[in-house]
Image (cartoon, rainbow, N blue to C red):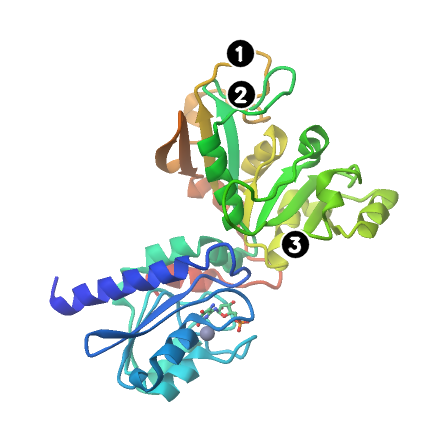
């Protein structure tokens, strides 16, 4: 690798690391990091901290001041060209006299979608995408944003804690605590990084969870309860704290008194309609909740998997043996042959105390079942294909 390429790698790595600082805070916006370099020295750094806050490039430009003239920008996402909550970054880069832009991926937001590159190139700035060599990393960093922009659905991660024999509770329903403290800390970190945590009404009735972030630093995600008729006890902790933390009940069809009681308690009530869970998830994405962590029980997790709506699994496996008659990870019919079982991909694992944390992706063939573009978030298949190809 020649010297210039190595420098590009180094500065882009730094831009990715800067972007990561916004994790959990930027929704519905993507994570973005930017580094400005002139004469071999960094003159500006920026990252996006959330909607309404300055974009990464704007922060870096402010730090660089006049030193941005003739500089190279390293940015994890295509600079925007639209007037949103903030002015277009592409215009600011042109005005500041930046000479070259190295960018990891195009912005799949239909409002940008190549216009940022056009604006930069039109003003004589050399745009370098590194032939797509950062595209996979960039798509991974903003997986939820990319998915929501491409198909109007959130990225869904199913998180469960199981015993060594795959049980999520004892036969009597007791589930506290299957996983150890280390695992619970990691699980709270997942909550802090998610836009929303989702459970089924059964879990609310049985466990009355708070679904807040406690064992680690971080802000609380929105809480979503999936229910048939919206009949959630109004005395439960989620409803009681709905005025402090955004709480949403998704129902197939609300029983009118249940809806009125939830509305009065400050809970957002959304009807999923005929499309069922997929429709409910579309509503969440349309409301800017792109990264959904499902902590549902076997019913909800089973339904998400069966309907092709789950993208990833995080499984905390504890060295416990529970035995027959206890609830399994999935309330879903078994396949008849192992050849027909769903084989997950991209498996990684780590230790957490005595537990194992296993992460895996649902195979594309299962996930793509419901990925037809729909609704107004999108018509983005083209943009994603482009960014998958590196542009
Ligand atoms: C950038 N740099 O740091 C971010 C970008 O409403 P706004 O003005 O905040 O615009 C949000 C959209 O801008 C968002 O959906 C995405 O397309 C892009 N985000 N772009 O150049 C940034 N956060
Ligand atoms: Zn911007």
User: SS at mark 1?
Assistant: loop
**Which residue matches tag 3?**
283
First of labels 2, 1 by sequence position: 2
State the residue lying farthest toward the top: 324
Q: Is 122 on the left or on the right of 239, as rendered?
A: left
Query: In the displayed structure, would residue 132 be above or below residue 58?
Result: above
Q: Residues within 10 Å of mark 2 (few under 14, many from 20)?
A: many
* Whether residue 179 can be seen here: yes
Mark 2 and 1 residues: CB-CB less than 8 Å, in contact?
yes
**Which residue matches tag 1?**
323
Find residue 346 and report its image quarter.
top left
Q: Residues within 10 Å of mark 3 (few under 14, many from 20)?
A: many
x, y percentage for residue 25?
A: 52, 58
State the mark number for residue 331: none
State the residue lying farthest toward the right: 257
* Whether residue 227 can be seen here: no
x, y percentage for residue 326?
A: 59, 16
């Amino acid at each position: 690798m020649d010297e210039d390429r190595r420098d590009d790698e180094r500065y882009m790595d730094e831009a990715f690391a800067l972007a990561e600082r916004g994790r959990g805070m930027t929704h519905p916006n993507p994570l973005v990091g930017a580094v400005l370099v002139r004469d071999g020295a960094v003159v500006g750094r920026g990252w996006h901290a959330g909607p309404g806050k300055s974009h990464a490039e704007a922060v870096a430009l402010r730090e660089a001041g006049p030193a941005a003239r003739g500089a190279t920008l390293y940015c994890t996402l295509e600079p925007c060209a639209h007037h949103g909550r903030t002015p277009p970054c592409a215009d600011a880069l042109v005005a500041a006299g930046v000479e070259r832009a190295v960018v990891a991926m195009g912005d799949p937001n239909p409002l940008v979608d190549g216009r940022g590159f056009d604006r930069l190139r039109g003003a004589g700035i050399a745009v370098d995408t590194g032939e797509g060599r950062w595209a996979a990393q960039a798509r991974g960093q903003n997986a939820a944003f990319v998915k929501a922009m491409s198909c109007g659905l959130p990225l869904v991660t199913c998180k469960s804690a199981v015993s060594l024999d795959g049980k999520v509770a004892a036969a009597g329903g007791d589930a506290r605590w299957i996983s150890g403290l280390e695992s619970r800390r990691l699980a709270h970190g997942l909550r802090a990084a998610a836009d929303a945590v989702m459970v089924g009404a059964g879990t609310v009735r049985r466990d009355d969870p708070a679904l807040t972030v406690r064992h680690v630093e971080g802000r609380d995600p929105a809480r979503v309860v999936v229910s048939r008729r919206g009949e959630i006890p109004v005395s439960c902790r989620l409803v009681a704290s709905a005025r402090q933390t955004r709480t949403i009940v998704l129902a197939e069809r609300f029983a009118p008194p249940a809806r009125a009681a939830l509305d009065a308690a400050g809970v957002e009530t959304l009807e999923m309609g005929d499309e069922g869970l997929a429709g409910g998830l579309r509503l969440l994405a349309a409301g800017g909740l792109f990264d959904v962590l499902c902590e549902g029980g076997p019913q909800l997790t089973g339904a998400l998997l069966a309907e092709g709506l789950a993208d990833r699994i995080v499984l905390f496996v504890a060295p416990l043996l529970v035995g027959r008659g206890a609830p399994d990870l999935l309330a879903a019919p078994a396949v008849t042959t192992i050849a027909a079982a769903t084989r997950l991909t991209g498996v990684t694992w780590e230790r957490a105390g005595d537990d194992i944390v296993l992460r895996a992706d649902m195979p594309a063939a299962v996930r793509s079942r419901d990925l037809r573009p729909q609704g107004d978030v999108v018509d983005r298949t083209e943009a994603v294909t482009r960014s998958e190809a590196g542009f």
